[in-house]
Image: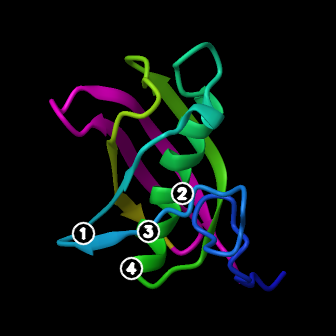
Amino acid sequence: MKLEDDNYCFACGKNNPCGLKLSFKYLNGKLTTEFIPHKIYQGYKDITHGGIITTILDEVMIQAAIAEGMTPVTAEISVRFKNPLLTNKKVIAEAEIIKRGSRLIEAQSRLLNSSDGTVIAEASAKLIPSK
């Protein structure tokens, strides 16, 4: 299957009116993005939904692989939630590729409170290069 980008990706698509509209920086093998989760992304009152956190962690790992010239899809993801992410608080997500193979890519990411560096969540994933 050929993967195409039409700018409607929920995580990074600039044309998706409901999306997160993430943008990325890649430097020295690490990809980063900043995000402020507004109240529309909450689960419990004033706490960002875990699915939004997982989406961000997944997307930065995919984008790290793209920055290194690959076009993968996620085969498996594991997320460990460490602290709640309050709404309207800026966070930084970062990711890097740990292992690059022809059939499998391993990546890791984490979400940090931008004001004090507290780890909100960490993830690892196995990505499959598309053909």
Residue 122: within the magenta?
yes
> Which amino acid type corresponds to the residue marked 4 in the rendered image?
Glu
- Whichever of labels 3 and 4 marks the residue nearer the N terminus, that label is 3
Label 2 – label 3 distance at C-alpha:
10 Å
For the residue pair 6 and 67, the one nearer the viewer reads as 6
Q: Which residue is mark 1?
A: 29
Q: Quadrant of residue 30?
A: bottom left
x, y (%) of residue 9? 69, 67
Dot 1: element: loop
> Residue beneath label 3, please?
23
Main SS, magenta residues: strand
Residue shown at 69% from the left, 59% from the top: 10
The residue stretch that appears in magenta: 102-131
Q: What residue lies at 58% left-to-right and 31% top-to-bottom?
A: 39
The mark lying in front, picked from 2 and 1, is 2
Image point 29% across, 73% down: which residue?
26
Earlier-in-chain disc, 2 versus 4? 2
From the viewer's perspective, is 127 left or right of 91? right
Q: Is residue 104 above or below residue 57?
A: below
Dividing the picture into quarters, in which one does residue 123 lie? top left
Q: Which residue is mark 2?
A: 59
The numbered mark at residue 96 is none
Circle 4 crowding by C-alpha within 10 Å: few under 14, some 14–19, many from 20: few
Image coords of residue 62 (percent x, y): 52, 63
